[in-house]
Amino acid sequence: MLAVDLIVEPEVEPIVSLAADRHFMHAVQRASRTRNAVLRVYSFGGDVLALGRYHLAPSPSDAASPVRLTRRHTGGRAIPFGDGFVGVSLVLPHRSALVSDDPFSLAPHQVINRYVRGILEGCKLAQVPTFYPGRDFVTVDGRILGLVSFEIDEHGALLFESVLANTRDFSVLPHFLEAVDPAGIVKAEMLTPESSTSLARELGTRLSLTEVAELLRRGYTKQFSLSIEPHTLNTLEVQAIEAVAAREFPPDTWLQGRRARQDLDRRSSVWMQLGVFEAQYSLEQDRFLKEIQFSGDFIANSAAITKLEHNLRLCPAEWRAIDAIATEIFSQPEHFILGIGRARAIADLIVRGLGA
């Protein structure tokens, strides 16, 4: 039976939260593991807009905004976070760890379907009839209750991530976007009160963070036959997480690390399964891709996107050459990109902008 540490953290700082997930992804991969897996349930204080890993960041503003901005480890849509929402991080040594010793037993498109089941089971224990209809949402009678996504790091560790609406719902997204992104850099589907819901609305009462964590603990225990025990961070762990936060997540390199660039003078954009899929790029001698940056709502392992952007440099600016590079990368079992359909959509996207 896999042993899982349950960590509950109220009103953690977003940068510290990012660092905690990164720290635990390293910890479950070490040769002399200090832990097998981590289930972390947490909240942020105030109003927060959480960008997906691949969104272009809005330009920094000198004006004080009531909404803070953060960027998740995982791809997917921009969503509201902060007061009234609960974050869930499940960290495992590899993407199939709860079902097999073979890291590639689960195909990438199966990962969310499998690990969301602990959340669904926990909500059903509270008599909330949640459903995963596919893609990246958890719903109740068709109304959005939560978002799910995942990242697999360069060593194969899995971070399965969810944000659940507890006492507020996702319809606050337009207000949050207006506050931090008046220029409209981030494209997003506008969710309404009618298309969204919350645990409080479904239950007719408010649950504390601890109560939500207990439902999730019970849900994952029942669904996967796990041993999940409460864990409080010790002094060494706190220091290690603070060091990761300082080293890997300063705002200028993490939050602003993917932004609109003036040197990339061509842009192509399409709406796909999860939302927008964009490419900014420049050409060398009008015949080769000089440099390229992808952005949008897709879900992918970060190593694959880094490799894709690197390998496309000086690639002939024609469909077959672009598709050959994308196909080679995403035919490897460790790499994936979800939410755009087939990998050929990458070449389609770039070629679409060549005549602009």
Image (cartoon, helix red, strand yellow):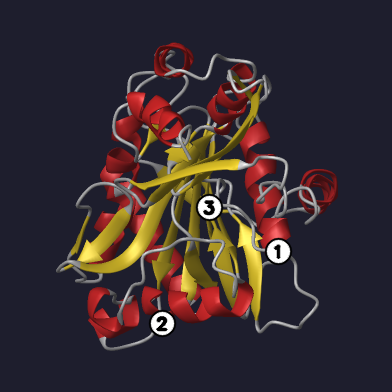
Q: Residues within 10 Å of mark 3 (few under 14, many from 20)?
A: many
Q: Nearer the viewer, mark 2 or mark 3?
A: 3
Q: Residues within 10 Å of mark 1 (few under 14, many from 20)?
A: some
Q: Earlier in the sequence, mark 2 or mark 1?
A: 1
Residue nearest the viewer, comparing 344 with 101? 344
Q: Is residue 86 above or below residue 241?
A: below
Residue at the extreme left: 141
- Mark-to-mark CA distance, 2 and 3: 22 Å
Q: Position of residue 109 (x, y in %)?
A: 31, 32
189 lies left or right of 55: left
Q: Earlier in the sequence, mark 2 or mark 3?
A: 3
Q: Position of residue 251 (x, y in %)?
A: 78, 56
Q: Check disc 1 and report its element: helix, strand or loop.
A: loop
Task: Give residue 52's mark.
Answer: 3
Q: Position of residue 281 (x, y in %)?
A: 60, 35
Residue nearest the viewer, comparing 227 with 59? 59
Q: Check disc 2 and report its element: helix, strand or loop.
A: loop
Task: Give residue 167's mark.
Answer: 2
335 lies left or right of 341: right
User: Label 1 amino acid?
Assistant: Ser
Q: Would residue 97 be visible to someone looking at this image?
A: no
Q: Position of residue 250 (x, y in %)?
A: 81, 53
Q: Which residue is mark 1?
A: 59
- Mark-to-mark CA distance, 3 and 1: 16 Å
